[in-house]
Image: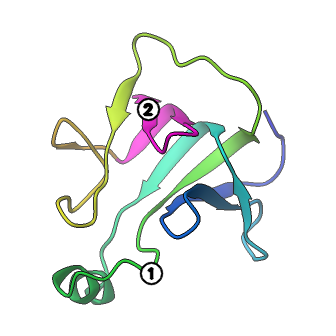
Amino acid sequence: MSSAQRGKFYKNLNRDRWSFYPTSTPPVQHCKQAELSGVTCKQPTSQAFWDCHLNGKSRNVFCWMIARTWAVDEPFEIPPEAQRIRFNPHRDKFFNVNGVRVDRLEKVWLTSTGECWGVL
């Protein structure tokens, strides 16, 4: 795991990869997969999200995960106790596990197939 400052991660729908800021400022970087620890979910709350959501647009970033430590493009195994974390801006209002909102996760795995798994 990186000991760098917090990183912000989100699914880049235009590049079919994960995008991240390794510090609080750009430039943005990209990775195929990542393993995160000490994760806080930044949920969509702005009116801009709801306006964009209602109009069917998806070009803006309204939610992301902030990791205390992280590693990108290194091999990992997702443990059996991990649960699928979902956020689809066309269906969901927040990051969730089976419809139940999640705001913090101990560990998160962002896969090269675009899935997100986590341990609460």
Q: Secondary structure at mark 2?
A: strand
Residue 118 x, y percent position in the rendering: 44, 31
Q: Is residue 15 magenta?
A: no
Q: Is residue 81 left or right of residue 65?
A: left
Residue 27 x, y percent position in the rendering: 79, 75
- The residue under the point 28% across, 86% down is 52
What count of labels does the image hold? Answer: 2
Coloured how? rainbow
Which amino acid type corresponds to the residue marked 1 in the rendered image?
Answer: Asn
Q: Is residue 117 magenta?
A: yes
Which amino acid type corresponds to the residue marked 2 in the rendered image?
Answer: Trp
Characterize the local packing of mark 2: few (<14), some (14-19) or many (20 or more) Cα atoms within 10 angstroms: many
Q: What range is drawn magenta here?
A: 103-120
In the rendering, which numbered label is found on residue 60? 1
Q: Image quadrant of residue 70?
A: top right
In the picture as drawn, the residue positioned furthest to the right comes out as 3
Look at the magenta stretch and give its main secondary structure: strand
- Label 2 belongs to which residue? 117
